[in-house]
Image (cartoon, rainbow, N blue to C red):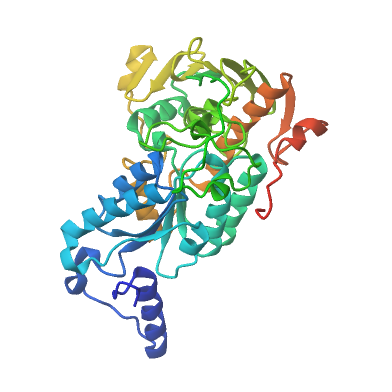
Amino acid sequence: MNRKGTINRRTFLQCSAWVGGAATVPIIVPASVFGAEAPSNRITMGCIGTGRMGQGDMKDVLRFGDVQIIAVCDVDSKRAKDAQTLVNNHYGKSLGQAWKGCDIHGDFRDLVARTDIDAVMIGTPDHWHTLPAMAAAKAGKDIFIQKPLTLTIKEGRALSNAVKRYGRILQVGSQQRSDDKFRLACELVRNGRVGKLHTVKVGFDTDPGCEPQPEMPVPANLDYTMWLGQAPLAPYTEMRVHPQNDYGRPGWLRISAYGHGMITGWGSHHLDIAQWGMDTELTGPSEIEGQAVFPKEGLWDVHGDFRIEYTYGNGVKVIAMDNKRNQQGVVFEGSNGWVYVRRGFIDAQPKSLLNEKIGPNELHLYRSSDHKRNWIECIKTRQETIAPVEIGHRSCTVCLLGSIAMKLGRKLKWDPAKEEFLDDTVANHMLARSMRAPWKL
């Protein structure tokens, strides 16, 4: 029994296996006994990070009758309380007195240690993705994690290895893969409808800088030391962390100590689609060259306008630029035409490509129409999700390679099999970051 006095999914399955083994016959419980929300079907969940993206992810999951959020975790107690209220109001209406309430934790380690939780959703800042995800994998939890997967390439390799080692189901929040327009664009390209692919153009917005910010008192509701985590110590100011009065876009997204800016913000979406369409999901480029404008002063220090050129082993070039020069989205250019896709829109030349049918003997890509539902179904079946950890790592790696190239401003040679730069000590040093004690991989 769990703390709410009900049998959870993990306990039910364990008990069924034990009794079945003892009696040498399986236990079969008719669906009429429990219905669609039988304990063996219900997935109990904890949510780590309940801010702007985390709360949105929670609302998506609250739609599902076979999932039950029983705990939330945030270093900002006010945000954790808001999340708790959201969950309690939802289940209070649907379950009435049977609902015993959602718990709050301030430390992710307490949440992942719970034996009554099957899966976790991670919606923390980028520098806080890897450690909770690895702890969850080791504790036997399945994982939904917001993009970008990790802060560094070394972290990505460690997380991918851990997820495989512990046999967990992970879904990266690269939801464009669950959109029919992006899937169609990639199917057209991979089935040769544009001829021989030679160039992929990727465009997305950039972030501005800001003025230097004054140090401020740390709000009583924020565990700021825990929020900093592995990152270096830095004076608190609201524009470093997140707004205290709303759920607007947080300042940490524009600070290199906690992320890489739009190269991972939007790049994790569009460069992921580029890899999908090129059939390079499990590899990467061999050369990268980048230039960017960086703020000369102020708190926000990630890249502004940029240009990155990736060259792949098959000769295809991916050119990523700010959307002043490349239109928002992804353009696949081939010898016989092109396909352009962005959220809510797809176009092609010739136009007839849009009416093409992918034949039964042609390549059909993984089909998902609901990204989080795909994760839930894969938890049940133990099948791979549409955005699994290794593909997420490789897509994130392309973004991080671009970030390194922009900072160094010179051509780099990359070995995607060994995941290291060729004869470049400086670049290889940027594959990882030291973590502030006591945190470590």
Instruction: Please report the residue visible at 17 percent of the width from the left and 67 percent of the height from the top.
Output: 97
Instruction: Please report the residue visible at 34 percent of the width from the left and 42 percent of the height from the top.
Output: 56
Residue 151 appearing in the image = yes
Judge left or right: residue 109 versus residue 230: left
In the displayed structure, 198 sits above or below 184; it is above
Among the 4 quarters of the image, the one containing residue 254 = top right
Residue 271 appearing in the image = no
Instruction: Please report the residue visible at 38 percent of the width from the left and 51 percent of the height from the top.
Output: 80
Among the 4 quarters of the image, the one containing residue 312 = top right
In the displayed structure, 28 sits above or below 103; it is below
Q: Quadrant of the N terminus?
A: bottom left
Q: Nearer the viewer, residue 92 or 213?
A: 213
> Residue 379's spot in the image, x, y percent?
40, 58
> Residue 333's spot in the image, x, y percent?
50, 16
Judge left or right: residue 269 versus residue 78: right
> Residue 98's spot in the image, x, y percent?
20, 69
> Residue 384's spot in the image, x, y percent?
46, 51
Name the outermost residue toward the front: 217
Instruction: Please report the residue visible at 51 percent of the width from the left and 21 percent of the height from the top.
Output: 207
